[in-house]
């Protein structure tokens, strides 16, 4: 048995005194009504108290005919003396005059008090014991919680709405701040084209070799980014710069000459007409933006060969010289190969390599880097948002409006779970070399197969 505290001892003493007072009366009723033969004489010392929760023994011997009470810290902590007397009332017994040795006035007073206690007890019983519910071991059922007013729910809804509105406002402010760092240059022929049609967004990504902010220089990379929400995929389709095409107003030439003749808008028009597709916007980045973007996401991990390492170092020398740095800055150890972590300038040098393989292999290297950056961008947006904004946007020229940017930003939320699919135009076995114009060009021999590929990646299903 656990040790009883002083407060518990005092509580037991008080209840015991009340118990004994009431039991004296009950004992006298029993003696006079039942006679000694029907109710064995039992001394108060032989009576046992049921004291739950503090280790007192339990022995409810019905044969003794003696009343008892439960003394519980939990159930009786806030009860009054009158409450205890009420619970001691024997509901099946109504005393008569011969049971008392009192005068008429005292008898009536005590009888009225007993009736009042019985009424109070019955009222408490009605409140605590609903029909069909039975109590065990003298314990009361837990009180039912009151239903919360509907206004509390309304307050919660209002708070959540305010938080959502605040987050939305902050998000719009952030996108607006990023957009203000970009350079907007309209492509008039595509102004009325919707950014997204039937769940498909087509944006032409252009990388030029300009050392300055703007659209001067040549296009080193031409990649169509197709965000297909219906298919839950992002397609990165490279167009080789040496493809032989008809440039509107300029005649037959290599594809990247369209950029030289008329900037982003003319190369958009050339691709759209030659391959029968819709392009809504363009984004143009220069050397520095590409390197900054790769750095902002923490660099990229790529599988490279020792020969590619040599050319990474060669292009780094030029990049460092232009920026006024030591030409050996960021050079990789000679013979480095396998999985290698590349920082921004190293990743840029890897993409610019024209000396190994064909233009197909060069565009594949570009797509590897872009894919790695896209995969790391969502996390970088949380951990290095400032680096992304300062590294990319000041060096980016685009035909996206601010409203377009808000819409595109909502698409970016789903990028992490979308599959990235790489492709190339022209498709395998659909081209041949062509020197008919005195230039080394790539002539497409099966244009329909290439158009079909582009049609499939843009299906809204």
Image (cartoon, helix red, strand yellow):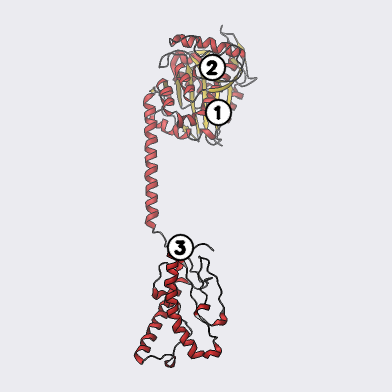
Furthest-left residue in view? 105
Label 1 sits on a secondary structure element that is strand
Quadrant where the C terminus lies?
top right
Residue 249 visible, this orientation: no
Residue 446 position by quadrant: top right
Residue sitting at 49 percent across and 24 percent down?
204
- Quickly name the residue at label 2: 351
Label 3 sits on a secondary structure element that is loop
* Mark sitting earlier along the chain (1/3): 3
**Is mark 2 in CB contact (under 8 Å) with mark 1?**
no
- The answer to whether 194 is drawn above or below residue 141 in the figure is above
Given residues 333 and 73, the one toward you in this image is: 73
**Spot occupied by residue 194 in the image (x, y as percentages of width and height):** 44, 31
Q: Residues within 10 Å of mark 3 (few under 14, many from 20)?
A: few
Furthest-right residue in view? 429
Distance from Cα at disc 3 to Cα at disc 2: 81 Å
- Quickly name the residue at label 3: 5
Label 2 sits on a secondary structure element that is helix
**Spot occupied by residue 267 in the image (x, y as percentages of width and height):** 48, 19
* Mark sitting earlier along the chain (3/2): 3
Given residues 41 and 209, the one toward you in this image is: 41
Q: Residues within 10 Å of mark 1 (few under 14, many from 20)?
A: many
Residue sitting at 53 percent across and 29 percent down?
375
**Spot occupied by residue 439 in the image (x, y as percentages of width and height):** 56, 8
- Quickly name the residue at label 1: 235
**Spot occupied by residue 346 in the image (x, y as percentages of width and height):** 52, 16
Residue sitting at 38 percent across and 85 percent down?
110
């Amino acid at each position: 048995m656990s040790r009883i505290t002083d407060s518990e001892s005092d509580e037991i003493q008080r209840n015991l005194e009340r118990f004994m007072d009431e039991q004296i009366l009950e004992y006298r009723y029993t003696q006079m009504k039942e006679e000694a033969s029907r109710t064995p004489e039992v001394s108060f010392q032989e009576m046992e108290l049921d004291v739950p929760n503090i280790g007192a023994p339990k022995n409810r011997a019905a044969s003794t005919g003696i009343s008892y009470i439960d003394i519980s810290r939990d159930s009786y902590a806030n009860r009054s003396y009158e409450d205890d007397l009420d619970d001691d009332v024997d509901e099946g017994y109504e005393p008569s005059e011969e049971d008392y040795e009192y005068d008429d006035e005292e008898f009536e007073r005590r009888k009225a008090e007993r009736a009042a206690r019985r009424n109070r007890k019955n009222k408490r019983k009605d409140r605590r014991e609903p029909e069909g519910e039975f109590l065990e071991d003298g314990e009361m059922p837990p009180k039912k919680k009151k239903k919360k007013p509907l206004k509390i729910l309304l307050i919660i809804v209002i708070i959540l709405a305010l938080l959502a509105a605040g987050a939305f406002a902050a998000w719009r402010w952030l996108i607006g701040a990023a957009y203000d760092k970009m350079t907007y240059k309209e492509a008039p022929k595509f102004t009325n084209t919707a950014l997204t049609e039937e769940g498909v967004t087509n944006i032409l990504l252009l990388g030029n070799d300009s050392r300055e902010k703007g659209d001067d220089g040549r296009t080193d990379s031409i990649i169509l980014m197709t965000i297909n929400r219906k298919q839950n995929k992002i397609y990165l389709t490279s167009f080789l710069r040496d493809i032989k095409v008809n440039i509107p107003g300029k005649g037959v030439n290599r594809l990247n000459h369209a950029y030289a003749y008329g900037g982003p808008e003319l190369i958009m028009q050339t691709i759209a007409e030659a391959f029968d597709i819709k392009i809504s916007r363009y984004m143009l980045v220069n050397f520095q933006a590409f390197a900054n973007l790769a750095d902002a996401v923490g660099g990229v991990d790529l599988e490279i060969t020792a020969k590619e390492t040599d050319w990474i170092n060669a292009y780094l020398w030029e990049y460092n010289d232009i920026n006024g740095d030591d030409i050996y800055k960021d050079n990789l150890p000679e013979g480095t190969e396998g999985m290698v972590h590349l920082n921004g300038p190293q990743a840029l040098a890897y993409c610019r390599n024209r000396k190994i393989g064909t233009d197909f292999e060069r565009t594949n290297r570009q797509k590897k880097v872009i894919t790695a950056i896209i995969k790391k961008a969502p996390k970088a947006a949380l951990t290095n948002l400032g680096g992304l904004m300062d590294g990319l946007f000041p060096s980016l020229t685009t035909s996206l409006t601010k409203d377009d940017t808000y819409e595109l930003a909502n698409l970016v939320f789903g990028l992490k779970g979308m599959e990235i699919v790489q492709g190339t135009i022209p498709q395998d076995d659909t081209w041949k070399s062509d020197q008919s114009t005195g230039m080394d060009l790539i002539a497409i021999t099966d244009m329909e197969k290439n158009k079909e590929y582009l049609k499939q990646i843009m299906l809204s299903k």
